[in-house]
Image (cartoon, helix red, strand yellow):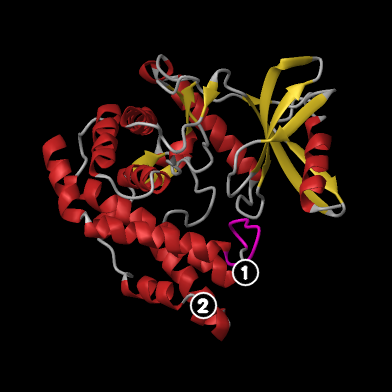
Amino acid sequence: MNNDVQLLSLAHAAAGAWLDAPVLEPLGNGHIHQTFLLSNQANPAECYVLQRVNSSVYCDIDLLMKQTRTVLKRLSAVPDFVSEYRLPELISTQLGDPFFVQRTDGEEHSWRLWRFIAGSRTCDPPQNRLQIRQAARAFGAYQRALAGLEPERLVETIPGFLRMADYVDQFDQALAAATAAEREQAAPWIALAQSHRQWPPSLMQPNAIIHGDCKINNVLFDQQGERVLAVIDLDNNMSGHWAWDFGDLVRSVTFSRGGFDAQDYRACVLGFLAGRGSDGLAAEHLVAAPAYLAFMLGLRFLTDHLSGDVYFSVPEHGDNLLRASEQFALFQGFEANKSLMEGVVGECT
């Protein structure tokens, strides 16, 4: 049985924890979890999103689910947010459990179910700058809505996540253990990583509760692509620097649109400021964060390649090196356009 067929079989069996007659198909192309669109054979209009949580990445599923519910409870208590955006809804199993643990062939798999947000779709890549601005506004509003949540209530679900110093240490360990052939193949990107080890301390210190994964495909639009319906993927909400969310969104938009564009960047700046507000946001961090996040992700892909692809799932060895090269190219693009970005921020703030 090949891997795809085996995974589909596992998913179908897990879906029975929620529905008696499940129908499912693969959904999305995420790097971490395996995700399926689930419907009820007796009522095809009743749709859900079934996910197998990657336990290699999220080692404490109980903690992950508990914190997700904490975040949802906080968001539901912010009238301005819920009046504009829908909240993702977790569905308990038929036995009332928050998630389902599947044990088969000596392995353990954890599954969870979300209600599908009717009439929604992703816009990746975004089709226009209005979509970019609306996505940025939604992420900014999301961060503002979480501002009243005490940082100590959210433990890192992935230890060291988005901590540059930790990623540099992991890179050093992977590089030391890599074969000579691996080091030679990745030599240009290893050299780039080695030459950019120091970053402004002010950009590395947590000062807000953040979403932690502000990719453009983590907002859902209506079918016309005219309005953001919801912010999704709540796994990495934690204490962090506010600019990490902004930088990751710019990085994501730039990647999906094929390179840096000053007007796309302007849409991100205007949208994020409109959603979050400008209080406490340093202009230099709006400029520096995209390069910081692109470099960080490139470093993570490079480290995973040198480690044997243990974090990001890939069809073939070498794919993570390709991903690293793409993110490092984005980083270089942001660095080359720094003066232009400073001008945009100056006009917008």
- Name the residue at the bottom extreme: 180
Q: What residue sits right under mark 2 in the picture?
A: 185
Identified at 73% across, 23% down, the residue is: 39
Mark 1 highlights which residue?
Answer: 308
**Crowd class of label 2 (few under 14; some 14 to 19; many from 20; radius 10 Å):** few
* Amino acid marked by disc 2: Gln
Q: Quadrant of residue 106?
A: bottom right
Indicate which label's residue lies in the foreground, 1 or 2. Answer: 2
Mark 1 and mark 2 residues within 8 Å of each other at the beta carbon: no
Q: Residues within 10 Å of mark 1 (few under 14, many from 20)?
A: some
Asked whether the viewer can see residue 168, the reply is yes
Of the two numbered discs 1 and 2 on the same chain, state the one appearing first in sequence: 2
Magenta stretch bounds? 310-318
Write the residue at 47% across / 57% down: 160
Q: Nearer the viewer, residue 36 or 185?
A: 185
Q: Position of residue 162 (x, y in %)?
A: 43, 54
Asked whether residue 207 is in view, the answer is no
The rendered magenta stretch, by its main secondary structure, is classed as loop
